Amino acid sequence: MNFPLSGDLLLISGKDNSFLLITKSPEAFVLFIEKPDEELTQTIEQGDMIAVSAPEGGDLMHAKILIALVLKYRMPLMVLPKGHPGSRHFKMLVSAGDQINMRCDLQRGTHPEQDVICSSDFLSGLHIRSTGEGVDVMGLPDDAAVKRIPCEISCEAINR
């Protein structure tokens, strides 16, 4: 199913409160991915997706801020080694690229590959692909909610 996006965010919500928030990059940039022993780089092309997964749900503003940190402020992504105890503290995860697969069998924050992202059981199996005008979402559960929401993050919204 194709969903057009033009400067908006696409919110896919599960019946279990989990969600995925997606936007498209308006320009190309280099995304830095920091691992304990090395730094990886990935070119994000204009039209590639920046996505935040919240496997247990959470505050939508938190997800919007994570998108802004990567998209506007070029915040690098941090990747922990497999088995790291800090992975349990990642309530929301970021992925970027032209395709993203949602999986519930990943340890949070331990995958530098940007074509996968940790999700809830409910949203596991979703495959999202960037298209010229929006995103294609495959494997969408029948009872998932999908809606477009405004992208802007204002100081007023952050300070509440």
Image (spheres, helix red, strand yellow):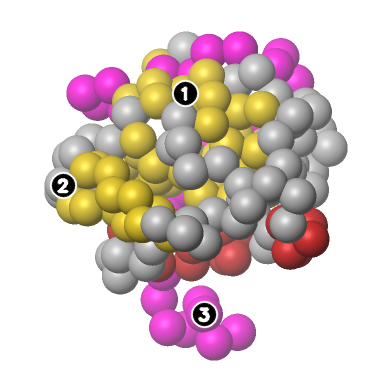
Q: Residue at x 19, y 52 (%)?
A: 29
Q: Which residues are magenta?
A: 131-160
Residue 45 location in percent, x, y? 19, 39
* Mark 1 residue crowding within 10 angstroms, few (<14) / some (14–19) / many (20+): many
Q: Considering only order in the chain, which callout, 2 or 1, is on the residue closer to the N terminus?
A: 2
Task: Examine the image and state in which quarter residue 107 appears.
Answer: top right
Q: Quadrant of residue 121?
A: top right
Q: Which element is circle 2 on? A: loop
Image quadrant in which the C terminus is located: bottom right
Between 16 and 103, the one lying in front of the other is 103
At 75% across and 29% down in the image, what residue appears?
105
Q: Secondary structure at mark 1?
A: strand
For badge 2, the amino acid type reads Ala
Badge 3 amino acid: Ile
Rendering quarter of residue 50: top left
Which residue in the protein does label 2 denote? 28
- Of callouts 2 and 3, the N-terminal one: 2
Q: Would residue 44 be seen by someone viewing this image from the given angle?
A: yes
Residue 148 screen position, x and y as percent: 47, 40
Question: 1 or 69, which is in the foreground?
Answer: 69
Please say if 40 is above or below 128: below
Residue type pointed to by label 1 = Ile
**Residue 58 relative to residue 50: left or right:** right
Q: Are marks 1 and 2 in contact (CB under 8 Å)?
A: no
Gap in angstroms between the C-alphas marked 1 and 2: 19 Å
Q: Classify mark 3: residues with Cα within 10 Å, few (<14), some (14-19) or many (20+).
A: few
Instruction: Give neighbour class at mark 2: few <14, some 14-19, many 20+ (Cα, 10 Å).
Output: few
Q: Which mark is nearer the camera, 2 or 3?
A: 2
The residue carrying mark 1 is: 128
Q: Residue at x 30, y 70 (%)?
A: 73
| Residue 158 image label | 3
Q: Does the magenta run of residues contain 19? A: no
